[in-house]
Amino acid sequence: MELIALHKRVIGLDIHQAQITACAIIDHDDGTHDIQRRQFGTFKRDRRALAEWAAALCPELVVMESTGIYWKSPYAALEAAGLRLLVVNARHVKNVPGRKTDIGDAQWLATLARAGLLRGSFIPPATLRELRLISRQRQKLVSQLAAQKNRVHKILTDGGIRLGVVVSDVHGVAARQMVKALIAGKSPSEVLELASKRLKASREELFDAVQGELTPSHRFVLDALMQHIDYIEASIARFDHHLLQGMAEQRNVLALLQTLPGVDLIGAAMLLVEIGPDMAAFGSPDRLASWAGVCPGNNESAGKRKSGRARKGNPYVRRLLCEFAHSARRTTCAFKARFESLYLRRGHKRAIIALAHKLLRTVFFMLQRGQYYRDSATDYEALTVKRNAPRWIKALTKFGFIAKPA
């Protein structure tokens, strides 16, 4: 079958860690076409040579696969040359088995692009791509912090300290001071002096909880863990500051996203650098949900619906949405009712993914229309008035705006 050419000048790139194979298909007015093949390295000078060679051909489209992270630096070099680029999913352009070579892959990409059969993946602007590095590293730091905190809890339990039984968070302000006092070798009575009066546990329960058999090895490991936790928390604070500073121009969009239940400032910033503020890049909420990997999969054969396992998508967006879903299900809103109705039939994990799907669709329409979130089940304005009305009336009466009742 002959593919109809929709583009007359296209370039396909097969990118690897140390080599880039390029194939250009150039159509002429007489109906013939030329195929040019070149190979480049991946160092800066090689990427510059690739950009100059590609720009000299004046292509209508340059196509490459999203192979790990190797495509990013060639993409930036070609983007700086002002070329129209397309990054496609590798599984959408899989070649015929048994005929796979680097040159063959590049030519196959160029052939599909020439026929207009490829749809590019979402690539955010350069500023957001840079902020993605900060946002994604922050997620890694948060994972490390959780692992270290869990390790502290295990070491304390191994040493006979049962502080986690009587306090809700071993790493709260008061509990952390108590742990550091235990590491310093202070007696249980001295440790109790650091306990907050807001703790629900009695003094007797706290006294029993902090009595254990911490050996010098326990204290050595705990001291190292606590220092590492302090360092990670300071690093996360620096990352937050840098991320919000880079998102200063998007403050209105960030404020818009924060009206959604379960979304705070940092969460809104991390989501925005992943999906971008312009929903025209996705076109529909269904495509956005499929790209993020939070929508059900399609698997039907002979009229039977089989397992609809969700496809692999953007793991960073999926993780954020699941965090938002866990927070939203604890608030008074329509998302809470949605979770509770699904939880009984489908279980906790499936209900969370379904709630993440609903949240992402809501985000799509909020950004597309530029409208803040209005809950269908709860009037937040009425709740705010009900909560603050007595204080407002008291202040207005105090300053003479309302007459005192007789």
Image: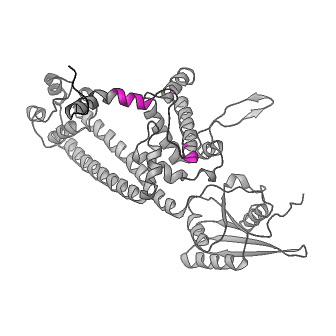
Whether residue 160 is in magenta: the answer is no
Q: Is residue 185 left or right of residue 335?
A: left
Which of the 4 image quarters holds residue 354? top right
Magenta stretch holds residue 376: yes
Q: Is residue 283 left or right of residue 301?
A: left
Q: Quadrant of the C terminus?
A: top left
Return the residue nearer the eye: 173 or 222: 173
Front position in the image: 172 or 123? 123
Scheme of colours in the image: one colour
Q: Residue at x 40, y 48 (%)?
A: 266
Q: Nearer the viewer, residue 155 or 20?
A: 20
Residue 35 vertical placement versus 324 (above, below): below
Relative to 29, does residue 360 appear above or below in the rendering? Answer: above
Q: Which residues are magenta?
A: 366-386
- 390 left or right of 83 in image: left
**The N terminus sits in image quarter:** bottom right
Q: Position of residue 149 (x, y in %)?
A: 31, 41
The percent coordinates of residue 295 (x first, y second) are: 62, 38
Give the mark count: 0
Q: Residue at x 53, y 20 (%)?
A: 344
For residue 50, above or below residue 66: below
The structure residue drawn at horizontal position 54% and vertical position 22%, both measured from the top left corner, is 341
Look at the picture and state if 216 lies above or below 9.
Answer: above
Where residue 146 appears, as percent x and y from the top left, is: 36, 42
Displayed quadrant of residue 121: bottom right
Q: Is residue 331 left or right of residue 117?
A: left
Q: Position of residue 289 (x, y in %)?
A: 61, 42
